[in-house]
Amino acid sequence: MEHWLFNTDETEPEGEGKYKKLIRQRVVAAWGSCKGLGAEVTLNRPEQGDWIYFFRAGYGIIARAQATDVYAAPSRSIFNEAGEYCRPVDSLQVLPESMPITVASIKENSGYQIPYRQVMGRILNKAAQDYLEFRFGSTETLPKKPLPKPKPGSFSFFQPDPEIRKKVERAAIRFVKAKYRKEKWSVRSVERENVGYDLHCTKGSLVECVEVKGATGNEQQIVLTANELGKAQTDNRFVLYVITNALIKPTAHRYSGSQLISGFDIQPIQYRAKLK
């Protein structure tokens, strides 16, 4: 298990006071270049179960939580900035506002200077880790955040809450699986195989490569990976299902690959740049 220091970006105008939203939403978040790593890579450095300490500039460490198995995803729910990512955390412990763990106290008790100038920096010193463990030892762990009931029509394009987003994805997949099985198709999940679609469906000689997208509202606006788009462009077995109102009253919308290409306005929203 590793220990990480997460800087809540209090010194930037965009980050002032945002530590409250980070704690309330049970996430870590970042935006921009993050010293060249990018926000997504930076937030995904901790492994599941690692401790992440929330550092507020001018105060010290104010909370800690554990990284989950859910990785960072695009969001504008904290800083409302382009290129923002959020990652959910669990087992959150928040210190009393009058009792932050200061940089000076950590150095005094361990001789170690914590990496507070980094967005997400590893705490490498065992004495510092032990001191932080001691300070949080009697702090209550907050219960998991209750999920709000989604409203029809809200967050159709991108759901910022990672827990709700996961529920939407699972609900949409369940709905489509049930639909195919009701029609006597064999269904195999290939979501983890990086093949450009979610479900491999067969019935006799028929084969459909089914990509599933879920939304909490009515709007059919989705995010596609390059792999998924490539599959739609090159494989006539590709089928897209968009499931609107996935958590309330699921409605299926079916498209072939050619219908996706001709019927949707497809725009790139991110690029990857690699030094030549």
Image: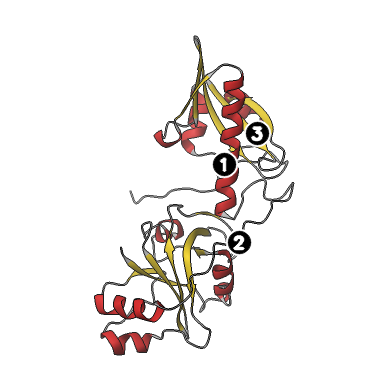
Which residue is the site of mark 2? 77
Dot in front, 1 or 3: 1
Disc 1 is placed on an element classified as: helix
Q: CA distance from mark 2 to mark 3?
A: 26 Å
Q: Residue at x 30, y 90 (%)?
A: 108
Give the label on residue 155, or none: none
- Residue 16, horizontal then vertical, whole percent: 57, 77
Which residue is the site of mark 3? 264
Q: Earlier in the sequence, mark 2 or mark 3?
A: 2
Q: CA distance from mark 1 to mark 3?
A: 20 Å
Please indicate, yes or no, whether residue 6 appears anywhere in the rendered image.
yes
Query: 10 Å neighbourhood of mark 1: few (<14), some, or many (≥20)?
Result: some
For this rendering, which residue is in front, 269 or 28?
Answer: 28
Q: Residue at x 72, y 38 (%)?
A: 249
Disc 1 residue type (three-letter):
Glu
Q: Residue at x 42, y 64 (%)?
A: 66
- Residue 219, horizontal then vertical, whole percent: 71, 41
Which residue is the site of mark 1? 169
Dot in front, 2 or 3: 2
Is there CB contact under 8 Å for labels 1 and 3? no
In the image: residue 244, left or right of residue 76:
right
Disc 3 is placed on an element classified as: loop
Query: 10 Å neighbourhood of mark 3: few (<14), some, or many (≥20)?
Result: few
